[in-house]
Image (tube, grey):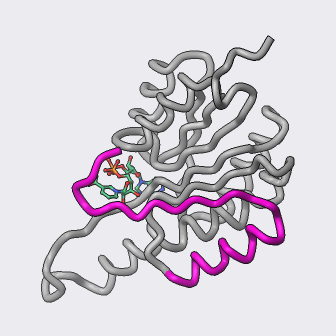
Amino acid sequence: MPSGKRLEGKTALITGAARGTGAAIAKHFIAEGAHVLLTDVRDELGESVAAELGDSARYARLDVTNEAEWKSTLAALGEQEGGLDILVNNAAVLLLQPIDQTSAEDFERVMRVNALGPFLGTRSALPTTSRGPAGRCVDRECRIHRLREWHDDNRCIHGLEIRSRWPNAGDRP
Ligand SMILES: NC(=O)c1ccc[n+]([C@@H]2O[C@H](COP(=O)([O-])OP(=O)(O)OC[C@H]3O[C@@H](n4cnc5c(N)ncnc54)[C@H](O)[C@@H]3O)[C@@H](O)[C@H]2O)c1
């Protein structure tokens, strides 16, 4: 009998979920009946958060800037869960400092995590989220216009529902 929970039977992958907003989203999704794969580069913290969340949560290391890690993580998820219903591109780094104190390396690091990461994630997940029209991709923060256009194109091709959140710095969910 259906439980009335909105995410019953759904599998979600959340990036940057070892703490903060990502961990809070994981907790909320599990309360709504989802199975959640929490991913991050903070392995110790991620493992302990997943253990606290119980049997519906697992942790796996996934550096969102690494395409090979996206592929292997999604392949393993496909074998274990049969596919993916919801991708939350949450991982990001926030760099609030004057431009004259910011190096090209700082800038590149931010762009790799905040822009390349969601691009690789969305592109890698498309084949596994095509289980049906219920596939969803949520971007916490995509500041790149082109990424939004890709999303719009893919929404047409793959029937995905894609939601982008554009909050102000300092906002909390
Ligand atoms: N906190 C805010 O004020 C605020 C405001 C607006 C938007 N946001 C957005 O919300 C999201 C989460 O914010 P938060 O405050 O929870 O941040 P946070 O720093 O607490 O969490 C971000 C997580 O991303 C992980 N991460 C960083 N680089 C990674 C990588 N290469 N691969 C995988 N994981 C990586 C970090 O380890 C961390 O656990 C981000 O997209 C952020 O830009 C936050």
Residue 154 in percent (x, y) is at: 75, 71
The part of the chain drawn in magenta is 145-173
Residue 73 in percent (x, y) is at: 69, 48
Q: Which is nearer the eye, 83 or 48?
A: 83
Residue 35 against residue 72 in the figure, above or below: above
Looking at this view, name the residue that lies furthest to the front: 4
Residue at position x 66%, y 77% in the image:
150
Residue at position x 52%, y 49% in the image:
15
Looking at this view, name the residue that lies furthest to the top: 1
Q: Classify the position of the C terminus by image quarter.
A: top left
Q: Classify the position of the N terminus by image quarter.
A: top right
Residue 101 against residue 84 in the figure, above or below: below
Residue 124 against residue 8 in the figure, above or below: below
> Is 148 on the left-hand or right-hand side of 53?
right
Q: Which is nearer the eye, 65 or 156?
A: 156
- The answer to if 21 sits in the magenta stretch is no
> Is 89 on the left-hand or right-hand side of 23?
right
> Is 71 on the left-hand or right-hand side of 158?
left
> In which quadrant of the rendered view does residue 36 lie?
top right
> In which quadrant of the rendered view does residue 109 lie?
bottom left
Residue 63 in percent (x, y) is at: 53, 56
Residue at position x 86%, y 49% in the image:
132
Residue at position x 52%, y 62% in the image:
164
> Is 31 on the left-hand or right-hand side of 141?
right
> In which quadrant of the rendered view does residue 64 lie?
bottom right
Residue 107 in percent (x, y) is at: 33, 80
Q: Is residue 113 visible?
A: no
Q: Is residue 16 visible?
A: yes
Q: How many marks?
A: 0
